[in-house]
Image (cartoon, rainbow, N blue to C red):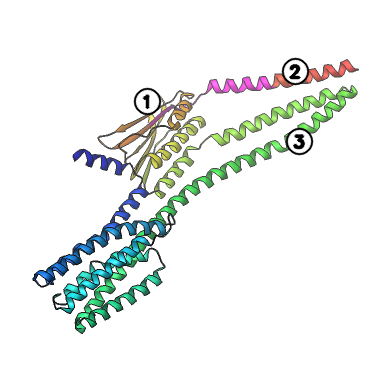
Amino acid sequence: MIRWGRQKRRSWRQRSKLEQVEVSTRWMLLLTPWIYFVSGMPQFLIQVTSAPRPKALAGAVVVLGFVQCVVAVRGLRQGVDHYLGKAEARRGPLAIVAGVFALSTTLVTVLIAHGWAGDTVGPAMALFAGVPGLTGVYGLTVPWRRSAAVTAAGSALVAGVFAAAGMAWPSLLGTLFVLGIGGVTGIFTPRCSAWYIAVMQELDEAKEAQSRLAVAEERLRFSRDLHDVMGRNLSVIALKSELATQLARRGAETAVEQMREVQELARQSQTEVRAVVRGYREAGLETELAGARSVLRAAGVDCRIESAGPEMAREVQSALGWVVREGATNVLRHAEASRCTVRLGAGARGSAVLVMENDGLRPEASQGGSGLTGLRERLAALDGTLTAERDESAQLYRLRAEIPLDGRRPSAASAEREAERAVGGVAGAGASAVAGEGEGRE
C-alpha cells in the first residue's frame, strides 16, 4: 500500500501544472454526484416510517440513487470530453440517469401518498441526492438555456405529481426550492469546470503558438538579412562572371580584371555573411537575462537576478547568454518550479561565474536532449566549464558556468583566417586559370 502511494505521488509530481489542474478539476467534478448522494440520502432514510414496507421502498430509492451516481460519473466524463470537442455526445448515460431518476421519483411519490415519507425534509432530500447528477450530464450536452428551461419544467412536473399525491403546499414550496438549488448547481458546476479546463488548454496552446511564432519571426529576420547582404553581391558576381566569360572567349585581357573583381566581391560577401551569422549566433547577456526573467515570471516562476559581474569580453557575454537561455528553457520544460535565482559574479583566477538555481525537481531526471552537451562544447572553446547537479535534500537544480574573463578563442580565429586564405587561394587560382586560357587563345 505504501509503495502504491509513493508511485502515485511520483506520477502526480511528474505531471505538468496544466495536467495537474485538469486532473484535479475532473476528479472534483466526478465526485459531485456522490457528495449530493451522501448529503441527501441519510436525511431521507431518517424521515421514512420504520415499518418494513416503507423501509423496503426507501432502500430501493437508495439503491437507485447509487446506480444513478455510477452512471452519472460516466456521463459527466463523456460530457466534459464533448464540451471540450474531443468526443461526440452520447445519449446512453443520460437516458439511463433520467430513467433511474424517474423511477426514484415514483417510489418517493408512493411513500408520500401513503404518508410514509415523513415531513417536507424527506422527499426533498431524496430528490436533492439525485437531481445534480441528472442535470449535470444533461447540461454538458446541450446549451445552458435549454438545460435550464428543461430543468424548470421538470421541477414543476415533479411538484405537480407530489401535489397530486397529497403533499401540502408548504412542503411543495420547500421541494421546489430544493429542486431549483440542486438543478442550477448541477447545470453550472460541470459547465464551469469544463470551461475552466478549456481555458487552461487554450492558454497552453497559445504559449506554444507564441513560441513557434517567435522562432518563425527570427528565421524571417535572418533570411531577410541574408537577402539584403547577398542579393546585390550575387547579382553583380553573376554579371561580372558572364562578362569575363565573354571577354575570355574573345581573348581580351580585361577578362582577368573582371575575375579579380569577382574575387573581391566573393571575399566581401564572405565577410558580410560571417558578420550576419556571428550576430545571429551570439546571445547578449543582458538581453538574455531580461528575457529569461520576463518569460519565467509569465509562467508563474519568481525569477530573481543578482548581477555583480565584472567587465568581460564579448565572447564571454555571448556564451553566458546561451547558458541563461538554455537554463530558462530547462526550468520551463523539465521542472515544476516556483522560484529561480540567477547569480552572476567574479570567480577565482579572473573568471566569470554564472549560477542558476531552481526548485520544483521532478522525481526522475529528464532523459535525452543535447542542450547541455552543446553548452559544454561552446564553453570549452573558451576554456570554460559547465556543471549541472541535483540537490535532492534541498530540492534544487543548480547550473553553474565558469569562463575566463579574457575569452580568447585562438583556435576559432586561426580557423577563420585559414578559411579566408583558402577561399582567396581558390579564387586566385581560378583567375589565373582564366587568364592563362585567354593568353593561350591570343
Secondary structure of the residue carrying tag 2 is helix
From this view, report whether residue 206 is shown above or below residue 8. below
User: Circle 1 sits on which residue?
Assistant: 348
Q: Quadrant of residue 56?
A: bottom left
Q: Distance between the residues labelled 2 and 3?
A: 22 Å
The quarter of the rendered structure image containing the N terminus is top left
Q: How many marks?
A: 3
Residue 418's tag is none
- Left or right placement of residue 383 versus residue 233 in this view: left
User: Circle 2 sits on which residue?
Assistant: 429
Which residue is at the front of the view, 96 or 330? 96
- The residue sitting at the front extreme is 53
Decide: few, some or many residues near mark 3? Use Cα within 10 Å; few <14, some 14-19, many ≥20.
Answer: few
The quarter of the rendered structure image containing the C terminus is top right
Q: How far apart are marks 2 and 1 (CA)?
A: 50 Å
Q: How far apart are marks 3 and 1 (CA)?
A: 53 Å
From this view, report whether residue 333 is shown above or below residue 204. above
Q: Which residue is drawn at 36% across and 61% down?
A: 92
Which of the two discs, 2 and 1, labels the residue nearer the N terminus? 1
Q: Position of residue 82 (x, y in %)?
A: 41, 58
Q: Where is residue 360 in the image (x, y as percent from the top left)?
A: 32, 41
Secondary structure of the residue carrying tag 3 is helix
Q: What span is colored magenta in the figure?
A: 400-423
Q: Where is residue 369 in the image (x, y as percent from the top left)?
A: 43, 32
Which amino acid type is shown beneath numbered disc 1?
Ala
Q: Residue at x 31, y 63 (%)?
A: 96
User: Circle 3 sits on which residue?
Assistant: 235
Which amino acid type is shown beneath numbered disc 2?
Ala
Residue 69 magenta-drawn? no
Which amino acid type is shown beneath numbered disc 3?
Ser
Residue 406 magenta-drawn? yes
